[in-house]
Amino acid sequence: MRRSAVAIALIVVLAATSMTVWAQAKKAPEKAKDPVCGIMVDKDPNLSTEYKGEKYYFCSKADMEKFKKEPEKYVKKK
């Protein structure tokens, strides 16, 4: 009887863990609009920069460098 209870508990824990992992894997990455070319991109910290307290994300290092050289050209006026 005790072995059955332990086996059931183990199955429940494994099922809960696998469901949590599956749910996290299914979650789509957050998106942002590249201010240089206008396409939607994943929010990748390696392709981002801050300007005037706002974080901007890019599709490539080339776009990020263009933005850094002339940020006012790409930032929308509010």
Image: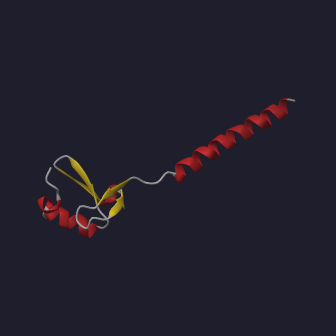
Q: In which image quadrant can residue 47 be found?
A: bottom left
Residue 21 rendering spot, x and y as whole percentages:
58, 48
Q: Is residue 24 above or below residue 44?
A: above
Residue 45 rendering spot, x and y as whole percentages:
33, 55
Q: Is residue 68 above or below residue 23?
A: below
Residue in the picture at 34% in, 61% down: 40
Residue 4 rendering spot, x and y as whole percentages:
84, 34
Q: In which image quadrant can residue 70 be found?
A: bottom left
Residue 22 rendering spot, x and y as whole percentages:
59, 50
| Tally of marks | 0
Q: Residue furthest front?
A: 78
Residue in the picture at 22% in, 65% down: 36
Q: In which image quadrant can residue 14 be found?
A: top right
Q: Is residue 5 left or right of residue 51?
A: right
- Image quarter (top left, top right, bottom left or bottom right) of the N terminus: top right
Q: Is residue 10 above or below residue 49?
A: above
Residue in the picture at 19% in, 67% down: 66
Q: Residue furthest bottom?
A: 62
